[in-house]
Amino acid sequence: MRPKTRSAAKAKSVHAESEGHEDASVSRRRAAKGRGTGTDEDGDDSDGDNLLMVSFENHLKKVNSQFLKLKKEYAALKEKNEELTRDLNTAREMAVENEAQPKRGKKAGPSVTSLQKEVEGLKQRIEKLQKAEKKDKKLIKQLRQKEVKKEAEYLQDDADDTLEVDDSAHKLRKLLRAFKDLMMATSLEDGEDCDVCYDRLQVDGTVCFPCEHLLCEDCFQKLPGPNKDEWDELLKIANKFAVMDHQSRGVLDTSEEEEEENFLDDDESVTASTEPNPEGSASHLLSTSPEPEGTVPLFSEDVPTTPKKKRLIASSDVSSDVERKEDHEKPVAGPSNGAEGSPSYALSPAAEKRRKMEELAEARAQKRQRR
């Protein structure tokens, strides 16, 4: 049987369309004849419409039949394609088998099928060996556990039999060491406060020193250092300030500057050195003229020296206390004299200097407590 092709189907569809056109032309001619011979125009129009409907129905039927034919042809072609693909796969497999076979005249080697069978047999053997290995591992594990238990029981029996006084003494020494460590350890009591900020100490936020003093972690991080180092730094800053002031004015000599560096000593070396030279004592006062309008440098030679104002020497840490004391002091009108008003800090006796420094230290301690 000759297979159906798409070209034949197209030819049939073209033939059916030509026949449809012929039927339509015939129907039109009949309608024209009826119009020419009939006397009633309405009857002629209805006959023409009927003929058109009949022709349309014929065309639809032909199109439906052609669609069904094409659908059947598509199914047949699909089946044929599947058959061809199967044939192609079988041909490829046969070609592979033929390539694996040796040529004539040589020793015949194993075929592909025999090799595949051998591989499958080896895989099965591997699976069996793996299962046997798992069983052996389980058995070995059980035997090891049994041996360990037996050895532990044996050692326990030996330990019970060979217990002597030395072992008990060793245990007692260990207990005493643990008791001593617990007694020497620093503990935190309930309701204990920090000695610096007076806040309640917490277990996780408390620091213990080797001397067994307790502080909270915030205060421990804020400690600047010992009080001795702090006073040394204050003295260094005060001496540097005095040297800079004296160098800018050019009045004091080197011996007077060296004597002024030790102004906190108990002896009266500073006053003794300044008595024979009244001009030097007047310039030894740490005074500055009132600042005029505008900005003037702090140590300038052009600044007039007649109106003077007393000023305290202090470090940057106690600047607020110095400003508070300067507010209470008033400028002295006219030239300053040693007899008028209170003497300056540099010319005051050692006891007065020590008292003023203690007042500054107390003010700073009160400021810390307010924080």
Image (cartoon, helix red, strand yellow):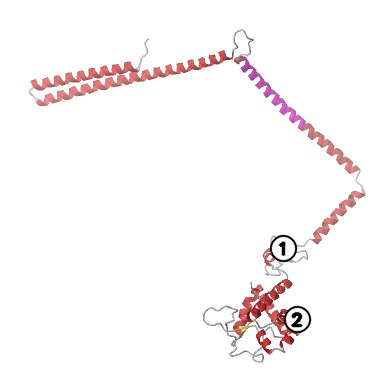
In the figure, is residue 342 to the left or right of 79?
A: right
> Disc 1, disc 2: CB below 8 Å?
no
| In this view, 363 is above or below 190 | below
* In-image side of 138 versus 332 (left or right): right
x and y percent of residue 346 in the render? 69, 83
Residue 357: x %, y % from top left: 70, 79
Pointer 1 residue:
207
**Nearer to us in this view, 364 or 277:** 277
* Pointer 1 or 2: first along the chain: 1
**Residue drawn at 88 percent across, 43 percent down:** 159
Q: Give residue 125's quadrant in the image.
A: top right
Q: Nearer the viewer, residue 234 or 44?
A: 234
Farthest residue to the left: give it: 39
Q: Residue furthest bottom?
A: 339
- Write the start and end of the magenta stretch as one range: 114-140
Task: Assess whether residue 185 is covered by the magenta stretch.
Answer: no
Q: Main secondary structure of the magenta part?
A: helix
Residue at position x 11%, y 26% in the image: 42
In the image, residue 226 sits, relative to residue 323, either above or below, namely above
**Mark 1, residues whose alpha carbon is within 10 Å: few (<14), some, or many (≥20)?**
some
Say which mark, if any, is on residue 265: 2
Residue type at mark 1 is Val
Say which element carries label 1.
strand
Dot 2 alpha-carbon crowd within 10 angstroms: few under 14, some 14 to 19, many 20 or more? some
Element type at marker 2? loop
Q: How far, Cα to Cα, is label 1 from label 2?
A: 38 Å
Dot 2 amino acid type: Asp
Q: Quadrant of the N terminus?
A: top left
Q: State how many labels appear.
A: 2
In the image, which disc is placed on residue 5? none
Left or right of residue 121: residue 95:
left
Q: What quarter of the picture does the C terminus occupy?
A: bottom right
